Amino acid sequence: MFASLAGVLFDGFAFGMLLFLLSVGLSVTLGMMNFVNLAHCSFAMIGGYATVSLANRYGWPFLATLPAAFVAAGGVAIALERTLFRRLYRASDLDQCLLTIGMVFISIAAYAFFYGTVVQSTPMPSYLKGSVQLFGMSFAAYRLFLIAMGLVVAATLVFALETTRFGAQVRAAVDNQRMARGLGIDVDRAFMITFALGGGLAGLGGALAIEIVGLDHAFALNYLVYVLIVVAVGGLGSIGGSFAAAVVLGVSDMAGKYYFPWLGAFVIYLVMVALLMWRPVGLFGKR
Amino acid sequence: MEKGRAEVSYFRAQARWRPLELAFWAATLLPFVVTPSYLSLASQIAITALFALSLDLLLGYAGIVSLGHAAYFGFGAYSAGLLSKHYLGEPLTGLVVGAAAAGILGYVTSHVIVRFRHLALIMLTLGLGLLLAEAANSASALTGGADGLQGVKMSPLLGFKFDLYGRTAYAYSLAVLFCVFLVARRIIHSPFGLALRGIRENATRMPAIGAPVLAHLRKVYTIAAAMAGAAGALLTQTTSTVSLEVLSFGRSADVLVILILGGAGRLYGGIVGAIIYMVARDQFSGLNPQYWYFWIGLLLVAVVMFLPNGILGGLSALRKKPQ
Amino acid sequence: MLSARNLNKRFGSLVVAQDLSLELPPGVRYALIGPNGAGKTTLINLLTGMLAPDSGRIFLGGDEITGLKPEARVRQGLARTFQINTVFPQLTPLESVAIAVLERERHAHNWWRGLPAFAPAIDEAQAILERLRLAGVADRPTRELAYGQQRLLEIALALATRPRVLLLDEPAAGVPKDESAELFSVIAGLARELTILFIEHDMNVVFRFASRIIVMVGGRILLEGTPEEVRSDDRVREVYLGRAHARAA
């Protein structure tokens, strides 16, 4: 029983790291511009398919594809931000919603066209296969790697946001966009960079997700709900909040699947609705 | 006094039936003679139009964005289906039960939903929709789960059997659509409808002129839920089955697309959108659903960027321009 | 008519209203003045229920309204306007004012009868628009109206609730000076028994149209008195002149 509990906690924590990578960008960009981007997980798909293509077709080693996934998703994020999203900052949330749902549909169809509808996988290097013995228990090596990635990214983000000039600009813009503009901060530029970073991190998450949950054309829609829950629970613009929410969600999702498999995703949705009703700005949100 | 009368006539002119409207409703009878082999498609269109009309009341008139409106459609569909499976197959009773069940669900959930706006509202409606879909999936003993609800048997409607060609089905769906449309039209041109438009325009200003915003929104939400439930019940009754799809996110997204395409905040927006959407989907039925959604996605992007008031809005802008 | 006792409100450590008490008798025209950030709009928000006070009580015509929602206070006869235009851009002035009249007459819940059946309410809406010189634009979308006309529509909306007390938050904000005098003459021409409190920065307008003046500074009421009393009060001079000196320096 104890071993299985520890196993659930470990797997859940690893899954939580994945959710954190997928959602942290959305949380910050939503906080900055109030732009409702339901296509955030499409960026994750870009990263995922970049990794699949590079690893399977061109034989790149898995680790080398990860930066490529980040760059590919971040690049597409910049391109879309400049051409489409930028024009809708002041539009109603309905218009933002519709535009980004449209993009989700397009991305799903595009991936189904190019890659088919089968679940994709990619070969893992030997040192990420198998398991590692620690404290008399065995842990899957890949999940340890995932946890390490999540922690490194979270620490880097918090450090960058707290200490760099750009981080201060982002924090000011999330806090009060009008005030930040008044102080001469180029909020649009800060947003573009943040948006690219967020898209890139989602792409990295998408690449890392292949081994855990698989990757198919419906990823953009299936994981949207998880990402939205993390953002809603964690609060807009809060990295710590996203981290905590992702861990809680990852662990409870794993526990639900392990202990109450017949309930499916019901528990997750119930938790989401209840939390939203209780605190619509999120557990750690300020607004 | 004279001037006051003139102002009343402003509202009277707004509510007047226009010749084009009468022609439109007359044209809805054409499928019986012109395309008798497409009557089941025609009844699908009427049902979808009814569903879109109910969303129009919420979104177009009261300004409530919903990504989970299928919850009420599906709840009505399952209620009507379970009633006919276990108790009685009389269609009109089933219709009323489906609408009432969805209306009650709408009333209960409205207490939560109308308090939110923006992102929280979008996520809450999305969450409630998913919650209900997941519940129906889990409660497979009741709903049949992924296999759908089997054994829905419909008695004749006022003596007319539901025939293979869909004559009864279309006449029934069209009659219900028309009746509900009359109700919606009346709501739009009533004091309540005017207050709803005020809420859509500026919800924070309304309390300062004495309007109980939340009470108004709860009411319209309940009405719209009941209408969606009626549409769901119609679908159950005309197809004699209920599948999980009635509660899916896809259905919520479709109806939103249909309404936006036709033009939200216009009585005929949802109906025109439903006709175009359903006919196009029928024409491209050979197309893999995934690729169908590619075009829908492209259409959404195009409508948001270039046609913010939908097809009807675009048409009326064209008509005004020459002046 | 309207009275407040010991209203307090703070946001965290920021005190925005401290022990505010006031008593507005029927039919008096009050001006509420004070430097920016003195808490004038906050006071109106507290009185109308847009903000809940931390402590204190509010009475309207002898009835306590402290716990009532904003719309319920409006129905009791307490109306307000806003500093920035918050009208209904796509509706016409006639439609906007009709909503307020219909709400007051408790018809706005009615969804089964067409608007033409409510002729008296619509006539009244039109009469209000005529009184505020807006009849000519009554059926144009509000967003097409001139700015000054939108300011007048703000007042028309408040009047349509048939208030006993009217709180005007900078009714002439953003209006050119000559139009602002015209706007205030419209306000001055409103029914004599109506109690009015208006926030205004232009001292000429204040001394011309107010019969009594309340001065607020830093979330407190500094002074309440006639224009003469306020004009000759040293503390008021200090607040305004002191500010002027500070600006000049």
Image (tube, grey):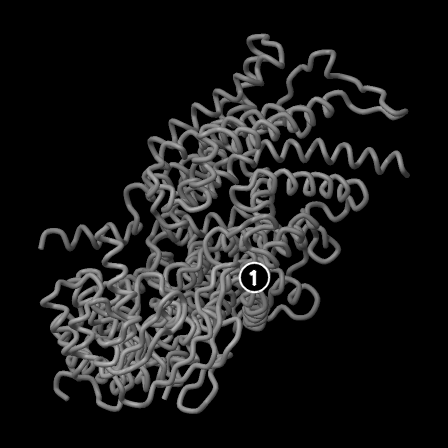
Q: Amino acid at mark 1?
A: Gln
Would residue A33 be visible to someone looking at this image? yes
- Is B286 on the left or on the right of C195, as rendered? right
Of C88 and B277, which appears nearest the observer? C88
Quarter occupied by residue C144: bottom left
Q: Give the residue at x 47% y 42%.
A: A30
Name the element at disc 1: helix
Would residue B91 be visible to someone looking at this image? no
Position above or below: C24 against B83:
below
Counting from the top left corner in percent of width and height, residue B15 is at: 26, 73
Q: Give the residue at x 70% y 66%.
A: B86
Q: Check the image and name the residue furthest to the top.
A: A59
Q: Give the residue at x 36% y 81%.
A: C78
Quadrant in which the N terminus of chain C is drawn: bottom left
Position above or below: B108 against B318:
below
Of B281 and A84, which appears nearest the observer? A84
Q: Check the image and name the residue furthest to the front.
A: C234
Of B161 and B67, which appears nearest the observer? B67
Q: Which residue is mark 1?
A: B237
Counting from the top left corner in percent of width and height, residue C173 is at: 22, 64
Quarter occupied by residue C176: bottom left
Counting from the top left corner in percent of width and height, residue C248 is at: 21, 52
Position above or below: A185 against A61:
below
Q: Identify the chain of the residue marked 1, using the numbered disc in the image.
A: B
Q: Residues within 10 Å of mark 1 (few under 14, many from 20)?
A: many
Q: How many marks?
A: 1
Q: Give the residue at x 20% y 71%.
A: C152
Counting from the top left corner in percent of width and height, residue C100 is at: 32, 77
